[in-house]
Image: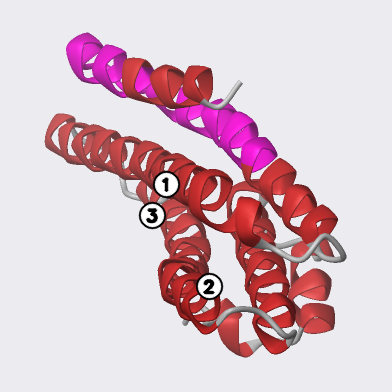
Amino acid sequence: MQKNFEELSLKEYNSLLASDAPAPGGGSALCQVAAIACSLIEMAVNVTAAKPVAEENREFLLGQCEAVTRAKKAFFRLSNDDAAAFQRIADGFKLPKTTEEERKVRSAELQKAYHRAALVPLDVMGLCREIIRLTEVRILPNLSRYVASDCTIALDLLRNAIRNSLLNVQANTALIRDADLAARLDRQAAQIAEEIK
């Protein structure tokens, strides 16, 4: 049974990541990085809110930060989803392929697995873009200057999560035989990556 990575300590997760198990891998790790970026944004908001600032600014910042907190929870879920998607591919390769019928079933299962494995990093990209936009427009301009750099670091981590998730989308779409489906997923991912340059 797959572990819920959110329940692991950083040390435990990193030990699992370094093991000879193929999952969790890069996609899962990118989700963990994105979750850490959200934590940095939350910290910057909480530090600012604890300082003597106008009450309306405090309420505004804390309200905006609720979306960041929800995103962090989603990134933890996506970290698990990414590992599960890879496991589904591995399970597909283990299916029997002696008869023609078995080969058809195996091929169909692998195609579904590749599709799911492309959707997870695409979801990661979309969520990162959402938090980048929110943070740049509504949070960063209202932060204390002492923690603004922490928020800038978080934004950079989210941008890199998008760039590297694009590679994961493309790695899986390259294995999808439905050319129209693969092209559509590639276009969606490329558009997100282009928007955050």
Which colour style is shown?
A: secondary structure
* For residue 121, side relative to residue 35 (left or right): left
* For residue 48, side relative to residue 131 (left or right): right
Q: Can you say whether 136 is above or below 23 in the image? A: above
Q: Which mark is residue 88?
A: 3
Q: Inspect the magenta stretch and tell me whether residue 172 lies in it.
A: yes
The residue tagged 1 is 130
The region drawn magenta spans: 159-186
Q: Which mark is residue 57?
A: 2
Kindly report which numbered mark, 3 or 2, lies closer to the viewer in this rendering: 2
> Quick one: label 1 or label 2, which is nearer the N terminus?
2
Residue 164 occupies quadrant:
top right
What is the quadrant of the C terminus in the image? top right
Q: Which mark is residue 139?
A: none
Q: Residue 36: where, in percent of width, then height?
A: 69, 66
- What amino acid type should be assigned to the residue bearing mark 2? Asn
The residues bearing labels 1 and 3 have C-alpha atoms spaced at a distance of: 28 Å
Q: Which is more toward the observer, 60 or 37?
A: 60
Secondary element type, mark 2: helix
- What amino acid type should be assigned to the residue bearing mark 1? Glu
Secondary element type, mark 3: helix
Residue depicted at x 64% and y 63%:
32
Residue depicted at x 72% and y 85%:
52
Q: Residue 189: where, in percent of width, then height?
A: 41, 25
Residue depicted at x 44% and y 29%:
172
- What amino acid type should be assigned to the residue bearing mark 3? Arg
* For residue 159, side relative to residue 109 (left or right): right
Q: Can you say whether 139 is above or below 166 in the image? A: below
Q: Residues within 10 Å of mark 1 (few under 14, many from 20)?
A: some
Q: Which is more toward the observer, 101 or 16?
A: 16
